[in-house]
Amino acid sequence: MADDQNPELPLTPPPDGGGPGALNIQPVNIEEEMRKSYLEYSMSVIIGRALPDVRDGLKPVHRRILYTMQQMGLAPNRPTRKCARIVGEVMGKYHPHGNLAVYDALVRLAQPWSMRYPLVDGQGNFGSVDGDPPAADRYTEARLTRVATSLLEDLDKETVDFRPNYDGSEVEPDVLPSRIPNLLVNGSNGIAVGMATNIPPHNLTEIIDATITLVNNPNAQLAEVLKFVQGPDFPTAGIINGRAGIFEAYRTGRGRFMMRAKAAIETFNKDRQAIIVTEIPYQVNKARLVERIAQLVNDKDIEDISDIRDESDRDGMRIVVELKRGAEPQIVLNKLFKHTQMEESFSMILLAVVHGQPRELGLIPTIKYFIDHRVDVVRRRTAYLLSKARDREHILEGYLTALDHLDNVIAIIRGSTNRADAREHLVMYFGGKKIDINTTGRAPKLDPEKPFTGKQADAILELQLHRLTKLSIDEIANELKQVRENIAEYESILASEKKLRGVIIRELEEIKKLYGDARRTRIEDEAAEILLEDLIADEQVAVTVSHSGYLKRTPISTYRMQRRGGTGRSGMKTRDEDFVEHLFIASTHAYILIFTNKGRVYWLKVYEIPDVSAAGRGKHIGSLVALQPGETVRTMVAVRNLEEEGKYVFFATRNGLVKKSELREFMHVRSSGINAIGIEQGDELVAARITDGQQILFLASHEGMAVRFDESHVRPMGRNAYGVWGIDLEKGDYVVGMATTPKPGAPPEKPAAKAEASESGEPEVIEVGKKGTLILSVTENGYGKRTPADEYRLTNRGGKGVINVKTTERNGKVVGIAQVEEESQVMLISQYGKIIRMDSKTIRESGRNAQGVRLLNIEPGDRVAAAVVIPPDEEPNGGNGGTLIQ
C-alpha cells in the first residue's frame, strides 16, 4: 500500500528490509502516540484558541483582530473599513482559520449587549439582543474604539514580545500591553478540552479601584478588595440575587449566583395591571424569552396573562405582559421567574492562561497577574524611552558642538567630495584630529570632552539651514535640557519600585477618568426561593367538587350567614346533568389530600385549586391530578404538616371496614397518586379523617344506624392494608359518613378485634360519653339535628350500632354526620348548587330518635349533596380547616 503523499513510499517495510522508504519508517506504540498527540491537541486548543490570557483578557483571535485593525490604521478618529477586509487581513497574516470564526469574534467585540466596554466600533447590522444574525462581512464596517486603543497603547515601545506568525512572514504580539484589566472588565467565556471558562464582565471603576488598592498594598485581603468590587456588572444590567456565590467565586475561582430581570408592575385602564420588563439577565435572548412566555400562556401553565408584546426601541428595552382582571401580579411574576429565563443562574469559572498554562484564579490573584504584567510593561517601556532619550541627547550634544564651530563645520562640509567624506572629516575633526579643511588651509586641532560619533555626524549633515538661526539654537538647548530631565526621570523610575508602581497608579486613574461609568447591575441580598404560598393570603376557603369532577375554591366570607331553613344562595353553576357532591373548608396554605373511591390518594396545595366566584364552575380535577379511569373523588382532608408525628389518617369504607395509617405515610405522594387503603371488589372508600390516635370514632349508615367506638381498637396499618370491621351492616345498608369526637376518659381495658356479644345478643357497652359533645346528622331532604354524643353507647368496633336518625319519607336517607360545637358553623350545599351557612346553635338539640328540623329549603327534585362544619376558630392557623359531613 502506497503513501498518499508519495506513491512510491511504502507504508510498511518490504519483507527483506530494503526499499527506498524503509529508513523513513519508525514503529511506535499506538497508545503512547495517541496520548501524546491528544495532549498536544488539547494544549493547542487551550492555549491557542479557547482560553483568554490573564494579562490582557483576550483570546488569540481577538488579539489578532485588534492588532490587525491597529496596523490598518483603524483608529477611533479614522474612517471605518469593510469587515471583509479586516477579516481577510487577520486570516492572511495571523489566523489561518475559517472566515466565519474570525467574523463572529469581530462581531462580538462590537456588540454592546455582549461587551461591557466594546472594543470595536461597528457600523451596520451587527446583530441584536433578540438573537438576529449580523449582516455579511461585505456589508458591515468597523474601527477600533477608544477603549481598545488603551489595550494597544505602547505596543511600539518594545513593551511585549513578538513572535513569528504561522508562516514566518510576519510577527505578532504574544500579548497586548493593555492598560485596562480587560479580563475582569469585559469577561470571557469559552470551552476548551476538558475545561471551560466563564468570566462575567465587571465595572471598570470598581476593578481599577481594587487594582490600585493591590498596587499600594499587595498583601490586602479579599474583604478589603471587596469594599470596591460589588460583583459582576452586566451590559444588559438586570439584578443579581445574593452575594454568597460571588464571594465564593472571588475566593476560589468558582461560584454560582442567580440573575434576574428587572420588572415593575404598572396599572393601566384603571383596573388592569401589567408587568413591565426593562432589563433581562446577561446573554438571554429577548425574542426567545417573549416566545417562552407566550408558550406558557398557550399551554395554560400561566392563565392570568391576557397579552404580551415587545415594545423595545432605540430608547431601551420594554416587554409588556398584560394581566387579566383580578390577577395577582406578584404571583404571575413569580411564575415567570420560575419557568422562563427571566431568572437564570450564572456559573462563574475564573479560568485563564497563566505563563502558558491554564489556571483557576480567585479575584486577587487575577488582579495581581495584571499588575505584574503592567509592572513589566512599564519597566520595558521606560527602558525603551530611556534608550531613545539617551540617543536623542547624543544627537543634541552633537548639534550644539557643531554649532559652536559652525564656520569650521561648514568649511569641512564644503571641502568634502561627498557625504561619506564629509561624515568622516567631521568625526575626525571633532575627534581631535587635524585635517585639511580645503586647499586653503587646515582646521585647528580640537581637544574634545566626548568622542564624536558617526551618528552625530550624520545628524549634522541632515541639519537644515533654518536650524542655524539663533532661535533654533535656543530650541536645541532647551530640548537637550528637557531630554536630560527625562533621562533622570526614567532612571529614577527604573531604580525605584515604588516610583514605578506610582506610574501604574497614575495611568489607572487616567483610564478610570476616561472610561469609568456608573454600575448597571443591581446586587440585592439573596432572597429565599419565592413560593406561591408566600404570595397568597392565608385565609379559610370553601372547596367544592361537583359530580362531574369540577373543583373550585371560594372565600367563605362570600357566603353570608342565614337563618336555619333559608333558601341559600347560588354556589355553583352546574350543567343539567351535574351537581355538587363535596364541600370542604380549609386554609389556602394547607395540603388537601384527595381520596378516591378506589382508595387512592392525591394531594394539592389548596391555593392550587382555581379561585373563582361563588357561581363559577371551576376547573376539572383531571387537569390538576392524574385520576385513573373510573376514579371519582370520595373525600378530602386538609392538613398543614404532613410530617407531624402522632397523627393518623382514619379510613372507613362503604361496606363498614375501618383502618388507620400514620400521616407520614403520605408525605411523598406522586402526581399519579398512591394507594391509601386496600379496597375489596364491590367496596369503596367513604370517609377519611385526621386523628391523633386518641379519638372516639362514630360511623353512620344510610338507613340511620350508628356505631361509636374507641380509636385504640384499631391498630396502625400500612397503606396497602384493607382494614378491620368497624360496623356490622344490614343487607342493603352502607356507611355514609364518619365523625370523630375527643376521648373523654380512659379507653376500654380490653379492646377486642371483634365486638363480644352480651347475654342479650347486643355488643358490650362501655359508658364513657361526655356530656356536651354533639353529633350533627343531616338527611338528604334538608333536615338535621344535633344529638349529644353520650346518647350513643360506646361499644367495641364491629357492632350493629343503634338508631341515629329516623329515615322517614320526610327526612329521606342520611347524607352524613359530623361532630360540632356550640360555636361551630354549618354549610350545606345541594345538588343544584344552593349553599347555606348557619350557626350550629340554631339547630335544635334532639335525641337519637328525633327526626330533626329543616336546615335547607330543598326545591322539588333537589337534595342535599354535602355539608361541612366550620370550626369556631376561622383564623388561618387554627387547625386543619372544616370537617366534611359524610
Image (spheres, helix red, strand yellow):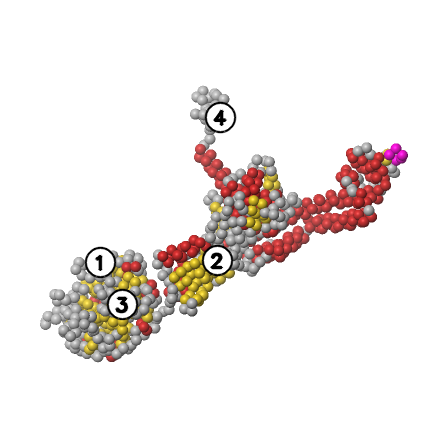
Magenta part, dominant SS: strand
Badge 3 vs badge 1, beta-carbon distance below 8 Å:
no
Q: Which mark is residue 119?
A: none
Badge 4 vs badge 1, beta-carbon distance below 8 Å:
no
Which image quadrant for residue 519?
bottom right
Q: Which residues are magenta?
A: 438-442
Q: Earlier in the sequence, mark 1 or mark 2?
A: 2
Could one spot residue 774 in this view of the protein? no
The residue carrying mark 3 is 573
Circle 3 packing at 10 Å, graded few (<14), some (14-19), many (20+), is some
Q: Amino acid at mark 3?
A: Lys
Q: Earlier in the sequence, mark 2 or mark 3?
A: 2
Residue 204 in the figure: left or right of residue 391: left
What's the residue at 13%, 65% (across, down)? 732
Q: Earlier in the sequence, mark 3 or mark 4?
A: 4
Q: Amino acid at mark 1?
A: Gly
Could one spot residue 307 in this view of the protein? yes
Q: Amino acid at mark 2?
A: Ser
Circle 4 packing at 10 Å, graded few (<14), some (14-19), many (20+), is few
Distance between mark 2 and mark 4 Cα atoms: 62 Å
Image quadrant holding the C terminus, namely bottom left
Q: Nearer the viewer, mark 2 or mark 4?
A: 2
Whole-percent x, y for residue 832 in the image: 23, 69
Q: Earlier in the sequence, mark 2 or mark 4?
A: 4
Of helix, strand and loop, which one carries label 1? loop
The residue carrying mark 4 is 6
Q: Which mark is residue 630?
A: 1
Distance between mark 1 and mark 2 Cα atoms: 51 Å
